[in-house]
Image (cartoon, helix red, strand yellow):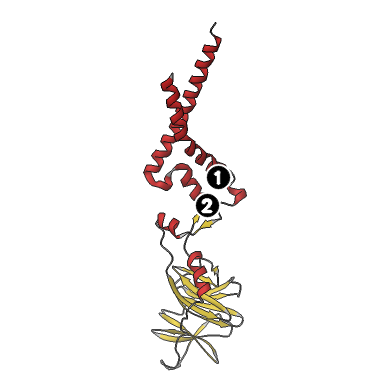
């Protein structure tokens, strides 16, 4: 009987912390939708390192009409807002025209509203190998390794430009403001959702294979704890019923 009491007590101590952790994470996971846990992202550097996620590498940035277009990894941001997936790097240049922001990428010329809404993506002319965009009094120029093209007034067609090869230089990238750069360094890196962190804590997968086995052992300990508790209760009841 003493051995059973001792086993019950030590299993209880060992299982208490695991049971508390599983209860708290399980309770939170039951309310994922209400708490929007699948929408909340964590970007702590130590947590990203634990999951093997590398920070997004900064690319070129261009000031345009009071805004900033910048590339981080494959993603392109307008100020702090990510642009739609249709607009992705490499970012090769940016200018403003007719109230729109024009972002040159390897896929084409993205026409953006000042709030980041995508108006259109204009394909590049022919087999153009773009180097950047330029502006002159007559509008927007696409500078490429194999030629130069001018964007018409409707921002919908390219026409070959007879301008001399060295007449224009691409609009150069610039350095992002320190505050914006720091904010984007975190926002551009894929974070870990709170839901995933809680799931990994609940299952023990956060600690790898050893964590899974540890949680399995804790679950088994709780089951044994329940069985030993029932056994002790049953034996105590039998002793009380004896004459």
Q: Secondary structure at mark 2?
A: helix
Q: Is residue 136 above or below residue 61?
A: below
Q: Evaluate whether residue 72 shows in this view.
A: yes
Q: Give the percent coordinates (x, y) of residue 183.
A: 52, 68
Q: Residue at x 60, y 75 (%)?
A: 114
State which quadrant residue 144 falls in.
bottom left
- Label 1 close to label 2 by CB (< 8 Å): no
Q: Give the percent coordinates (x, y) of residue 153.
A: 58, 85
Q: Residue at x 52, y 19 (%)?
A: 233
Query: Mark 1 or mark 2, which has the lower sequence index?
Result: 1
Q: Which residue is mark 2?
A: 194
Q: Give the percent coordinates (x, y) of residue 66.
A: 58, 80
* 204 with respect to 115 (left or right): left
Q: Secondary structure at mark 1?
A: helix
**Viewer-proximal residue, 63 or 233?**
233
Q: Give the percent coordinates (x, y) of residue 68.
A: 54, 76
Q: Which residue is mark 1?
A: 29
Q: Is residue 23 above or below residue 57?
A: above
């Amino acid at each position: 009987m003493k051995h059973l009491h001792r086993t019950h007590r030590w299993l209880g101590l060992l299982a208490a912390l695991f049971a508390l952790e599983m209860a708290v994470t399980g309770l939170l996971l039951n309310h994922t939708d209400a708490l929007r846990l699948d929408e909340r992202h964590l970007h702590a550097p130590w947590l990203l390192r634990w999951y093997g996620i590398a920070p997004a590498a900064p690319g070129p940035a261009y000031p345009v009409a009071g805004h900033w277009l910048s590339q981080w990894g494959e993603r392109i941001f307008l100020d702090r807002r990510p642009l739609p997936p249709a607009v992705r790097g490499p970012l090769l240049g940016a200018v403003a025209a007719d109230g729109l922001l024009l972002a040159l990428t390897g896929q084409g010329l993205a026409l953006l509203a000042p709030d980041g809404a995508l108006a259109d993506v204009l394909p590049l002319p022919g087999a153009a190998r773009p180097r950047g965009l330029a502006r002159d009094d007559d509008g927007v120029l696409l500078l490429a390794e194999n030629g130069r093209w001018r964007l018409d007034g409707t921002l919908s067609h390219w026409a070959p430009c007879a301008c001399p090869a060295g007449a224009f230089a691409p609009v150069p990238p610039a350095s992002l403001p320190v505050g914006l750069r720091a904010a984007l360094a975190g926002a551009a890196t894929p974070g870990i959702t709170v839901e995933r962190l809680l799931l990994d804590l609940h299952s023990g997968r956060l600690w790898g294979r050893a964590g899974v086995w540890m949680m399995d052992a804790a679950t088994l300990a709780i089951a044994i704890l329940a069985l030993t508790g029932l056994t002790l209760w049953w034996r105590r009841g039998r002793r009380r019923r004896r004459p």
